[in-house]
Image (spheres, rainbow, N blue to C red):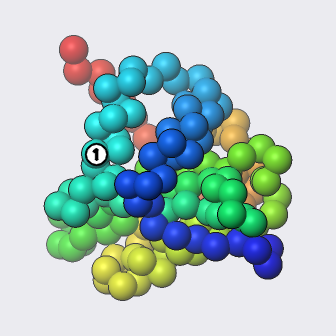
Amino acid sequence: MSNLEICDIQKKHYEVWIELYHKYAEYYQVDIPKDNFDLTWKWLTSENYPFWGILADVDSKIVGFAHFRSLPSPLDSCEVGFLDDLFVLQEYRGKKIGYSLIEKVHQIGKSKNWPYINWITKDDNYTARTLYDKISTKTDWNFYELIVK
């Protein structure tokens, strides 16, 4: 896509980011309290927190984002990357925007000397998985969650 630019999230992007993040939460059918959005934004815009975000801009319209972080890997004795969130507006999917966001995270990972970047997605997210299967290796790890209340 010739008019695509990937840029870092900055404080000036709050309004467009929160609109996209609401759509992301709707897509995954997650009800997120406003305080949680605010905390995520605080993490993304803090210089002292190892959590970052990038945006996809097409013709001066923000149409997607990726959130990612550094994560210690005890077995590898190093920091690795973790892609937490990736979202592109429905009408912009299939235009290599998701790929471009992941590629930018990949470049950042290289600069941080991460040996790899992990992420998860829902099993039925076939559109995203089609991309992921082309650019990465599906591992044989199963993902579990233990609820703490």
Visible residue check, residue 142: no
Residue 121 position within the rendered picture, expressed as x and y whole percent measured from the top left:
57, 44
User: Which amino acid lies under the numbered mark 1 shown in the image of this protein?
Assistant: Lys
What residue appears at the point 44 percent right and 55 percent down from the top-left corner?
12
Report crowding for label 1: few under 14, some 14 to 19, many 20 or more residues within 10 A (C-alpha). some
Residue 18 position within the rendered picture, expressed as x and y whole percent measured from the top left:
50, 39
* Residue furthest top as drawn: 149
Residue 68 position within the rendered picture, expressed as x and y whole percent measured from the top left:
40, 58
What residue appears at the point 48 percent right and 81 percent down from the top-left corner?
107
Q: Quadrant of the C terminus?
A: top left
Left or right: 86, with 69 as reference point: right
Q: Under tag 1, what secondary structure?
A: helix
Left or right: 116, with 73 as reference point: right
Left or right: 59, with 148 as reference point: right
Left or right: 122, with 75 as reference point: right
Visible residue check, residue 6: yes
Q: Nearer the viewer, residue 29 or 126?
A: 29
| Residue 39 higher or lower than 16, as above or below | above
Q: Quadrant of residue 50?
A: bottom left
Q: What residue is disc 1 on? A: 42
Residue 116 position within the rendered picture, expressed as x and y whole percent measured from the top left:
41, 72
Q: Nearer the viewer, residue 64 or 144?
A: 64
| Residue 31 higher or lower than 19, as above or below | above
